[in-house]
């Protein structure tokens, strides 16, 4: 991976090599940080880089920060502005991924959340696909359970909680799958290791509710809107049983990194005919256009950098 040239660090844009923390940093030792992940999409025709829903991403980041008892002067607007400045300085003309991080910066011993120094960093780097087989992924059910909201807030993107995602993903990849689905403590479908999950059954688009320990995904929200407005699909947010997944007609994952990833096999069982099916195909096309500012009705989601 090529490293970025710059970073927003301690209130300024500095050369990336100067954005360093010490080994005693609280967040590094205890996972007391939260991160975001948003994409910028290059539109070749317009020679423009579009940020996808930056305000929603930064609002969620600041909510994660609140869960960690952090206090910042920043607003979603000011963080969007900093990101724009950073991207202009990098002068990227390709698809990028932006990684903001809020973290407990003190170099001290002691596990707690309050009375510590909170910092924000942001970096951006070129980025393509995340799930290699994004039109025909083969997934399994993880033997790990998704963290419960009463263990670590699942609706925050809390760094320490991603050890759970890392277990899920590593075991899935080592077993030869592309990704894994993970269940809640009571055995309902929650999400993927870093994606929300949707299925189509009897022509209805179904996804677990935000109370099933899912991250409140911004791609999830976008896909729900596209499905209702553009495809006229009925939508249900409800608990999903494991065996419903084996019987559904279509299955896909959504996320900033994964975008809309079609899942065509689960534990060696074909979903539908075992190929990407029509609704998933349509949603991928619509989402792919919306993020590059190519759908007039969804220009509200994108913000030009240049
Ligand atoms: N669930 C988890 C655990 C994630 O890490 C992500 C990626 N941020 C998602 C779902 C998808 O969220 P979004 O669409 O906002 O990227």
Image (tube, rainbow, N blue to C red):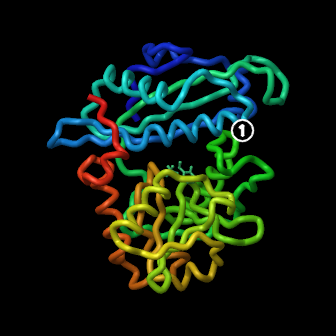
Task: Identify residue for label 1.
Answer: 67
Mark 1, Cα crowd under 10 Å, few <14 / some 14-19 / many 20+, is some
Q: How many marks?
A: 1
Give the vertical position of 75 relative to 155 (above or below).
Answer: above
Picture residue at 45% right of the left edge, 19% below the top: 16
Image coordinates for residue 13, horizontal then vertical, percent = 44, 15
Picture residue at 44% right of the left edge, 49% below the top: 257
Hey, which residue is sitting farthest left in the picture?
45
Secondary structure under the numbered disc 1 in the rendered image: helix
Image coordinates for residue 206, horizontal then vertical, percent = 53, 73
Give the vertical position of 220 relative to 108 (above or below).
Answer: below
* Residue 54 image-quadrant placement: top left
Picture residue at 37% right of the left edge, 27% below the top: 84
Image coordinates for residue 44, horizontal then vertical, percent = 18, 42
Is the distance from the Cβ of mark 1 to the nearest ligand 1 atom less than 8 Å? no
Towards the viewer: 23 or 107: 107
Q: Quadrant of the N terminus?
A: top left
Picture residue at 79% right of the left edge, 18% below the top: 108
Towards the viewer: 192 or 142: 192
Image coordinates for residue 266, horizontal then vertical, percent = 52, 75
Q: Quadrant of the C terminus?
A: top left
Towards the viewer: 91 or 50: 50
Give the vertical position of 205 relative to 145 (above or below).
Answer: below
Give the vertical position of 194 relative to 282 (above or below).
Answer: above
């Amino acid at each position: 991976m090529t490293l970025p040239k710059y970073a927003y660090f301690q209130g300024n844009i500095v050369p990336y090599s100067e954005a360093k923390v010490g080994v005693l940093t609280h967040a590094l030792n205890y996972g007391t940080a939260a991160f975001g992940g948003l994409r910028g999409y290059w539109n070749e025709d317009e020679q423009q880089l579009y940020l996808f829903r930056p305000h929603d991403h930064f609002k969620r980041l600041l909510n994660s920060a609140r869960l960690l008892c952090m206090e910042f002067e920043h607003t979603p607007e000011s963080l969007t502005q900093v990101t724009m400045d950073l991207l202009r300085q990098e002068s990227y003309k390709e698809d990028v991924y932006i990684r903001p991080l809020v973290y407990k910066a003190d170099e001290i011993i002691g596990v707690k959340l309050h009375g510590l120094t909170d910092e924000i960093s942001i970096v951006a780097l070129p980025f393509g696909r995340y799930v290699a087989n994004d039109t025909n992924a083969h997934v399994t059910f993880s033997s790990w359970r998704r963290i419960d909201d009463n263990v670590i807030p699942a609706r925050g993107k809390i760094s320490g909680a991603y050890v759970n995602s890392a277990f899920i993903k590593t075991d899935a990849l080592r077993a030869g799958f592309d990704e894994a689905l993970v269940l809640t403590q009571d055995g309902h479908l929650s999400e993927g290791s870093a994606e929300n999950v949707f299925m189509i059954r009897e022509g209805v688009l179904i996804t677990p509710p935000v109370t099933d320990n899912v991250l409140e995904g911004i791609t999830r929200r976008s896909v729900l809107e596209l499905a209702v407005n553009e495809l006229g699909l009925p939508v249900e947010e409800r608990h999903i049983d494991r065996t419903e997944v084996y019987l559904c007609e279509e299955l896909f994952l959504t996320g900033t990194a994964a975008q809309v990833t079609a899942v065509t096999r689960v534990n060696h069982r074909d979903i539908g005919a075992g190929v990407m099916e029509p609704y998933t195909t349509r949603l991928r096309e619509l989402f792919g256009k919306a993020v590059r500012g190519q759908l007039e009705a969804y220009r509200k989601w994108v913000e030009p950098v240049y």
